[in-house]
Image: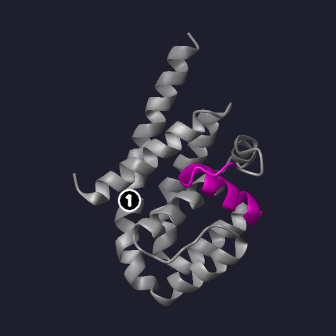
Amino acid sequence: MSDFFSNVFEVINTVREKVSSCKNSENILQGFGRRAEGAPTLLSQGLTQALTFYLYKVEELNKFVDVYGWLFKNRKPNIDVCKNLADDDEGYLLYTSVLFYLFEKLGVECKVEDVHGLKTCLTNISGREANIYRKLINYVIELKKISKIMLSEEETKASTQSR
């Protein structure tokens, strides 16, 4: 299996595993699915603009930094991550975290350790936007497909458990 598919499956498995510990995991994953569905179109209109939009929708960047660290760096969060993911029923917080993780996998200099690192990251992306977009879009399209599968599996599991 190529690195490409390994990375996509790694991301999906990490999201499923971590979010499954949250009380409202099905709703959280549905929000993620909605973001995954619309991402290819939004990103095609301009990568830097789309990222700015995602970060704007996240609202509190410190929450984003904590969720990212919790998901992908195994850092103990300063906040109640599950509550924040549940409060963000549109899925921006979770999906944006995944996008920034993919940048790291693509070799983009992005350190999501604090809010200042995000500024540097956006600057690095902006300078190489077309090149990064060409690499990222394949991941985003696969995430869209796999998130549909992931959601249908979660819905099946939830309906089986409620019986």
Residue located farthest toward the bottom when viewing the structure as drawn:
127
Image coordinates for residue 107, horizontal then vertical, percent = 41, 74
Q: Is residue 118 above or below residue 2?
A: below
Residue denoted by label 1? 141
Q: Is residue 147 visible?
A: no
Image coordinates for residue 155, horizontal then vertical, percent = 51, 28
Q: Is residue 159 above or below residue 59?
A: above
Q: Assign a secondary structure to mark 1.
A: helix
Q: Is residue 162 above or below residue 105?
A: above
Q: Quadrant of the C terminus?
A: top right
Q: Is residue 94 magenta?
A: no
Q: Is residue 121 visible?
A: yes
Which residues fall within the magenta stretch?
60-76
Q: What residue is rendered at 41% in x and 76% in y?
A: 133
Q: What residue is rendered at 61% in x and 57% in y?
A: 68
Say which of 102 and 139 sits in front. 102
Q: Is residue 70 magenta?
A: yes
On the picture, is 67 further left or further right than 99? right
Q: Is residue 50 above or below residue 67?
A: below
Image coordinates for residue 117, horizontal then vertical, percent = 64, 75
Give the residue type that dot 1 points to.
Ile
